[in-house]
Image: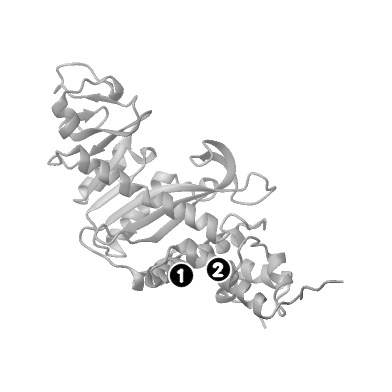
Amino acid sequence: MHPTRLDYCQYLLSSQINYTLTNYADHHEHFSHDALNRYLRGERLTSRMIWESVKPLLESTENGILIFDDSVLDKNHSHKIELVRRQYSGNAHGIIKGIGMVNCVYLNPETGHYWIIDYRIFEPDADGKTKLDHVRDMLTSALSDKLLPFSTVLMDTWYATKELMVFIESQKKIYYCPIRENRLVDDSCAARPYRPVAELMWSSADYAHGKVIKIKGFPKEHRVKLFRVVVSSNRTDWVVTNDLSQDSTLAVQEACRLRWTIEQFHREIKQLTGIEKCQCRKSRIQRNHIACAVLVWIRLSDFARKAGKTIYAVKKGLLGEYLRHELKNPAVRMAFA
């Protein structure tokens, strides 16, 4: 009897804390650690398989939203694991050792439901690709291969580059993304020199409706709309969009709120699938483990949606079933001397 993708995914779905191969082998009557290791070394799971799994579940709409962002799978206490590199983690607010993962989430704004539809592993030493390259590849795939209906692209500051923004616009899609406060812009139609976003003057009308600007380095006649979005008492986001007809800061604030959907996905997949927990050194094993963790998130998310529960309640419910079973038929019965 040999382990399969279904077996390994079931383990990641069922386990609550420990997601190691050793733990799996200790709790399975047929699979040894070596057999599990051989399976993960020999399998070749890809992001294409993720799309085939999620496609039947997708609630697509012409108003669909693609959200791009990256996340670092924390391997700070690991040693000699392939794919691991030192990189910035927004979650840790600093440089850590980890595996970079660039993700694409599809959001239906009418229902609030969302699905991961694509991802890439950040391994520039092997494929020479930047995170921006991966986003463009996934965007192109959504347009040309998946033929997904969507109208809007949401992304983080890291992806606010001329090349990517102009490319999205060339595909007749709308984007919203924050830019850094030191980005040089012009709101005077060339009457004054470029200056950092944070130094712009804002009238009450600008606060409510945004202002048209030119970003330095963009084509001569290229204009975008800039909005000042107050996130909290100590944080302001400077959000740009190519939708020049957008005249509501409140609407842009709502778009920024929707962008955080992908952060919710990152939390869920890290907390509920063991995606960061594999300690095997080989890159192929890490890639297959990550793919299986994504498949588990897809299954948990779909089950939760149909059951009218949160994904956390579904996962916790598995432990509840174990407790109910133990209370009825305890493996170790309580006794008094």
The residue sitting at the front extreme is 337
SS of the residue under disc 2: helix
Q: Which of 124 and 232 is in front in this view?
A: 232
Residue denoted by label 2: 13
The residue sitting at the bottom extreme is 1
What is the image's colouring?
Answer: one colour
Q: Where is residue 139 in the image (x, y as percent from the top left)?
A: 32, 54
Q: Which of 202 and 78 is in front in this view?
A: 202
Quadrant (top left, top right, bottom left, bottom right) of the N terminus: bottom right
Q: Which of marks 2 and 1 is nearer the N terminus?
A: 2
Q: Which amino acid does label 1 sit on?
A: Arg
Q: Nearer the viewer, residue 63 or 15?
A: 15
The disc label shown at residue 299, or none: 1
Q: In this rendering, is residue 2 above or below 314? A: below
Asked if residue 126 can be seen in this view, the reply is yes
Q: Position of residue 242 (x, y in %)?
A: 20, 41
Residue pictured at 17% horizontal, 33% vertical? 208
